Amino acid sequence: MKKHESSAPQVNRRLILRGAGGLMLGLPLLESLMPRNVKAQDMTDSPFVLILVSDNGVVQSGVTLGGAPEAERFWPSANGSLTKASLLADKTSRATGELADYAERLLIVKGVNLPYSSNGCSHSAADAQILTAAKITSGGTNCLAQGISLDTAIAKAKNPAGRDPLALHAGMFAPGGTGFDIPGYVSYVTPKQPRVYIDSPYKAYQQIIGVVGNGGTANPAETAALELRGKRSKSINDLLRPQIQDLLRRTDLSKGDVERLNQHLTAIRDIEVKMGTTNFTIPDASIATMKQLEPKPYEQATREQAVRLHLDLLAFAVASGYTRVGVLKIGDRIDDHQYTINGQTFKFHDASHRTMANAVDLCSAVDRLMMNHYKYLLDTLSSYETPTGSLFDQGVSIWCNQCATGAHSFSNVPWILGGTANGYFKKGQFITVGTGQMPGGSQDGKGGDGSISGVNKMLNTVLTAAGVPTDNFGDPSLPKGLFSELVA
């Protein structure tokens, strides 16, 4: 059968302003500058995918490492339709109640299982599977996935040639650590080759706007431009002001395009201002040294600010067309961050193992904190307007956890999806795939049932939503298929 060959024009959807010294600034899609015969639907990008991965599980019905039962404090109280009223009613007892404002726009999914048992550290084994659905290597503290991750597959299919997914990290440990002190990798370039995260929001910002290219060695002009900017503390908007003013003076720009452009420039400046007030230093001008830093603990005092900056950058990256996929890992192999909540300072990982009297309350409070980080991303995406509507539903933004519980269960790993990916996903629903039942007894690192609701089917579904039709992602021994119950 002969394929239909469309006569529609090939649209260059994104514009770039260029200045002296190699400075570049990607612009949002501007409807007025598209060819007259291009319709709004022709300007729609393939759906983006953003994924936040947290650590240490959530407080849901199950058992502790010691075998004691625990009550439900995470999932909505009833399957089916989600409403703001229903999640608000749950809010006092269920962490997902924090997302009440987005109830009608969410797809909360229970029952997803990681199929392969841990052969060492359960956290590392979970990280290696959550976005790969691949078998794992043996390793006491740091096993590896034997397959690529979802973000790599999407980037290869949908990003400009050679551009990796945006892989960010807010944790305590730099790449290259040993033993237990490792970032905890969820993004894989190739089998057994994890992708090195961008740890600094400033580095990620520079990469997105093109000042330091793709992370390789900068040429002398780019180096000079970066040094000049660092010395003058100027915004990229200031350095490219003549070009921006010329663009804004164009009489063929619509009012909507002017508003979108101003919003884009404001977002850039907001990110820069936040960076300037959180003690993130400008990196060395030599791009070649950025990924060669010695392993060291990250600054904990600015951890929550770093998370929010990374979320700003994820939204900006897809809004500007830099990438169609991005990942943020919150935590490391474990999340051993020291939180202070309700006046009590504690290590999250210790609390997840219930080593203190009120550990359940503390971990539930961290669950709520993560829900509010996720909500912040949804708020940010909702604030971006495009010629075809809000950015929110033009992709899907996902929050998940490496494990299901603090006791390292691999059954009922939580997945929450915000945004329909241009109408692909259902919304306003709490859906259970598979049985949704937590197996009895200790679940410490035990593979969940992958015969019906393995994580591979979730990854297949997300890939297909992103315009990469797939039914066999992950290890070939896993059953093929998608979660059709999630599809609109």
Image: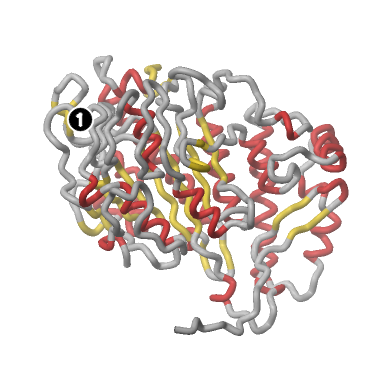
The residue lying toward the viewer, choosing from 472 and 66, is 472
Please indicate, yes or no, whether residue 101 appears anywhere in the rendered image: no
Graded by Cα atoms within 10 Å as few (under 14), some (14 to 19) or many (20 or more), the crowding at tag 1 reads many
Q: On the image, numbered disc 1 is attached to which residue?
A: 443
Please tell me in which quadrant of the rendered image residue 295 appears. top right
Of all residues, the one furthest to the top in this rendering is 356
Please identify the quadrant where the C terminus is shown: bottom left
Q: Give me the residue at 86% from left, 38% from top.
A: 224
- Tell me which corner region of the image, top left, top right, bottom left or bottom right, holds residue 259: bottom right
The reply, left or right, for residue 348 in relation to residue 407 is right
Q: Residue 266: x and y, percent? A: 67, 51
> Could you tell me residue 362's position as x and y percent?
31, 24
User: Residue 188, position in %: x, y?
Assistant: 49, 41
The structure residue drawn at horizontal position 86% and vertical position 39%, both measured from the top left corner, is 220
Front-most of 160 and 70? Answer: 160
Q: Give the side of residue 396 with respect to residue 320, left or right.
A: left
Q: Is residue 209 visible?
A: yes
